[in-house]
Image (cartoon, rainbow, N blue to C red):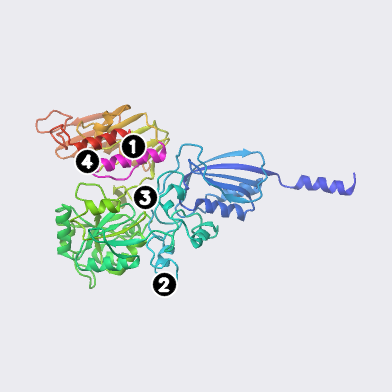
């Protein structure tokens, strides 16, 4: 053998073997900058292949030396984007293909969607700096966002999470936004809601007749002036309209209560900053973190007897005879810009009449909020799913979620094992729907009480959207055992097996499912409602019913003693049958 031939054989023996691996990843991997992250990691290691959204999450194919792919696999979960989370990974080794580059491909839609949907996320610090920097092209732009923040669930019509499946498909990106979207080194790389003042949604301030009074930033300035004058402003936010009023103005808050038909239930306030919130409330470190978190919920805080510094007292009518105050911070650029303009806290309550669902669209707001709002600060980005503000409280050092909505829904609750395909309709009060998908429970957003036809139609829409978004195919439906609840009626009209559940037991089991992750052995619970008490052992039940002489197990109807329904209620029931 010649020296040259021996040299070639030696090269072949020492050259690393090229292999190709497919990774199918599940978790919070859509709408969080995960594909750009994978793209950067693969390029940094010299790997070729591609990454794409799929119905299950994200699919990655990498090709290169085996030891390099192993390095890719090790590093993948170690430096994830801030909002990303990896739950499961399936790996398949494939025949070498011969990729010459690494690319982000169009989404794969071969299977029914099971990917997690990210909630709407509060404005990040980088975007906040841009909207208050006079030299930035997004200065004072109220719809600024990136891969780390902004709308997600509220604009999503279908999976996978691509711009074409969101309400942002109505806005074509300008050249500058498209350049950011296509740049792997930009934090807006493949940010689906990406927009700017040249190509994105715009604000308008309307009078009650729908006549435009101002637009763009001047709409914010004019709305702030009217709030200072004691007017009520309806603001179109992330998941629906909010009603705003000066939180220091007792007459404005009293008038808002009268118009909304809400005589004494506490209002929440939005403070311009954490420092100003601390002037009115005592805030612990845990509560401070919650207020400033990406979820940005309403946090129930203990009120100070008197505000610190030179701040004016808040109106007593905000939360009459209540030592607690619901407080949140601005969580969208629009809120930040308005509150910066004002410099004082505002009442921020759901845009609806008492016991009705939140309004989401401009025409609907002008009709349903007529006589409640003096002005309408609205915009032209459609809302796909209504979602209210979440409410949490710290008790015994731990977070207790009182209303699971914006920032948390529709993230799933993990189960210890796969569950049968089930749709759970919930109760009549503070309602929300849920569905099982493998070893996860997909929990829809809080809807509220179902006393009105409008509330029932909103419930039907939310439950149907939950099923459609995740392609849920339930074989059974769970509902409250109470025979007169709207959700129980919907369940009985379905063609599926109905599983009635006593709601005290549901509360206890729900609590137990959370405690199981922290400690073992908690097997007993006591549920109280009015004058009735039920004690449950998981596995067997001991009931103590005290209904003043009524038969055990049967409660008076919360809806009506009569079974007759109006035409609007029948229409809502028809919608309920459709969602099943």
User: Label 2 near label 4: C-beta < 8 Å?
Assistant: no
Q: Which residue is mark 2?
A: 134
Earlier-in-chain disc, 4 versus 3: 3
Position of residue 95 relative to residue 341, above or below, is above
Q: Secondary structure at mark 1?
A: loop
Q: Which residue is mark 4?
A: 453
Residue 428: image quadrant is top left
In the picture provided, is 93 more to the left or to the right than 239?
right
Residue 364 at x, y = what percent? 26, 50
Between the residue at mark 1 and the residue at mark 4, the CA separation in whole angstroms equals 43 Å
Between the residue at mark 4 and the residue at mark 3, the CA separation in whole angstroms equals 23 Å
Residue extending farthest to the right is 2
Residue in the picture at 50% in, 40% down: 109
Q: Nearer the viewer, residue 329 or 340?
A: 340
Q: Secondary structure at mark 3?
A: helix
Between the residue at mark 4 and the residue at mark 2, the CA separation in whole angstroms equals 48 Å
Q: Which residue is mark 3?
A: 154
Residue 521 is tagged as 1
Q: Secondary structure at mark 4?
A: helix
Q: Nearer the viewer, residue 11 or 130?
A: 130
Residue 569 at x, y = what percent? 21, 37
């Amino acid at each position: 053998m010649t020296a040259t031939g021996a040299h070639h054989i030696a090269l072949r023996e020492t050259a690393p073997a090229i292999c190709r691996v497919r990774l199918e990843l599940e978790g919070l991997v859509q709408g969080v900058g995960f594909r750009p992250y994978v793209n950067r990691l693969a390029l940094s290691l010299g790997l070729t292949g591609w990454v794409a959204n799929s119905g299950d999450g994200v699919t990655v194919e990498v090709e290169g030396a085996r030891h390099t792919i192993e390095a890719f696999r090790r590093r993948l979960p170690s430096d994830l984007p801030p909002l990303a989370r990896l739950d499961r990974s399936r790996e398949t080794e494939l025949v070498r293909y011969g990729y010459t580059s690494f690319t982000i491909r169009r989404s794969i839609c071969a299977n029914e969607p099971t990917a997690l949907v990210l909630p709407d996320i509060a404005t990040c610090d980088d975007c906040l700096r841009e909207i208050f920097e006079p030299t930035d092209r997004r200065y004072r732009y109220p719809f600024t966002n990136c891969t780390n923040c902004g709308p997600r669930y509220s604009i999503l019509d279908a999976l996978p999470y691509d711009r074409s499946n969101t309400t942002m498909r109505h806005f074509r990106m300008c050249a500058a936004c498209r350049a950011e979207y296509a740049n792997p080194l930009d934090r807006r790389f493949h940010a689906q809601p990406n927009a700017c003042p040249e190509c994105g949604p715009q604000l308008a301030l309307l009078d009650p007749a729908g006549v435009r009074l101002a637009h763009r930033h001047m709409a914010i300035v004019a709305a702030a002036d009217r709030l200072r004058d004691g007017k009520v402003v309806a603001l179109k936010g992330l998941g629906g309209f909010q009603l705003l009023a000066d939180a220091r103005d007792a007459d404005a808050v009293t008038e808002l209560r009268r118009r909304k038909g809400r005589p004494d239930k506490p209002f929440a306030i939005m403070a311009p900053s954490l420092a100003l919130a601390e002037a009115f409330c005592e805030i612990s470190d845990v509560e401070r973190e919650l207020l400033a978190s990406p979820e940005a919920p309403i946090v129930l805080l203990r009120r100070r007897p008197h505000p610190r510094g030179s701040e004016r007292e808040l109106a007593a009518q905000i939360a009459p005879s209540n030592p607690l105050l619901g407080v949140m911070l601005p969580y969208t650029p629009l809120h930040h810009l308005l509150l910066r303009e004002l410099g004082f806290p505002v009442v921020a309550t759901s845009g609806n009449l008492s016991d009705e669902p939140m309004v989401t669209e401009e025409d609907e707001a002008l009709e349903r909020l007529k006589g409640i709002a003096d002005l309408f600060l609205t915009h032209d980005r459609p809302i796909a799913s209504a979602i209210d503000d979440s409410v949490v409280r710290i008790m015994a050092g731990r977070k207790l979620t009182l209303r699971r909505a914006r920032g948390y829904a529709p993230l799933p609750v993990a189960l210890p094992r796969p569950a049968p395909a089930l749709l759970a309709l919930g109760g009549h009060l503070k309602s929300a729907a849920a569905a099982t998908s493998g070893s996860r429970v997909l929990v829809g957003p809080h809807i509220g009480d179902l006393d009105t036809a409008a509330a029932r139609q909103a419930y039907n829409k939310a439950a149907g959207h939950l099923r459609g978004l995740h392609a849920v195919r339930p074989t059974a439906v769970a509902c409250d055992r109470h025979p007169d609840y709207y959700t129980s009626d919907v369940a009985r009209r379905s063609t599926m097996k109905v599983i009635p559940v006593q709601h005290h037991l549901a509360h206890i089991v729900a609590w137990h499912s959370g405690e199981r992750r922290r400690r073992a052995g908690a097997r007993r619970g006591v549920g109280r409602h009015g004058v009735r008490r039920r004690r449950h052992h998981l596995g067997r039940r001991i009931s103590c019913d005290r209904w003043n002489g009524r038969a055990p197990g049967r409660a008076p109807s919360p809806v009506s003693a009569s079974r007759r329904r109006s035409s609007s209620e029948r229409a809502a029931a028809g919608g309920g049958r459709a969602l099943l």
